């Protein structure tokens, strides 16, 4: 099946390996283009996980898991010092 969408509008999973370098060169690398890419990513994540019509436990559990992992990483910077020692 041949895609009829222009190369610039294709998503990464729809781009063939031969088209990949020219697809990457079509990106806008100006500060405005990079900011727009971050904004699109933020809105995509927001619409997929936060602003849902039928909410469930998945969104809350992901936030809770991220919070727990972040606090664990902040409080246990040197885990090797907390290992029980066999000899004192």
Image (cartoon, rainbow, N blue to C red):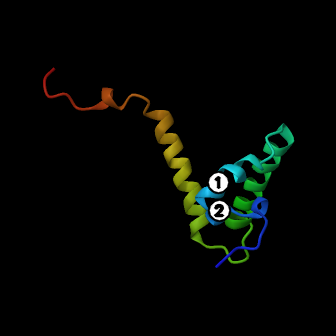
- Whether 30 is drawn above or below 16: the answer is above
- Residue found farthest to the left: 87
Point 69% across, 78% down: residue = 54
Point 73% across, 61% down: residue = 44
- In this picture, residue 54 sits left or right of residue 58: right
Q: Find out whether the residues at labels 1 and 2 contact each other: C-beta distance under 8 Å.
A: yes
- Residue found farthest to the front: 18
x, y percent for residue 46: 73, 60
Q: Which residue is mark 2?
A: 15
Point 56% across, 59% down: residue = 62
- Residue found farthest to the top: 88
Which quarter of the picture shows residue 1?
A: bottom right
Q: Nearer the viewer, residue 75 or 10?
A: 10
x, y percent for residue 59: 61, 64
The quadrant the C terminus occupies is top left
Q: CA distance from mark 1 to mark 2?
A: 6 Å
Q: Which residue is mark 1?
A: 20
């Amino acid at each position: 099946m041949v895609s009829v969408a222009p190369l610039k509008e294709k998503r990464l999973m729809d781009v063939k390996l031969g088209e990949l370098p020219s697809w990457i060169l079509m990106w806008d690398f100006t500060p405005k283009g990079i900011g727009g890419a971050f904004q699109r990513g933020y809105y995509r994540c927001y619409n997929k996980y936060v602003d849902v019509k039928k909410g469930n436990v998945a969104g809350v559990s992901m936030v809770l898991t991220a919070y727990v992992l972040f606090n664990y990483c902040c409080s246990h910077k040197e885990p090797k010092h907390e290992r029980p020692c066999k000899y004192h």
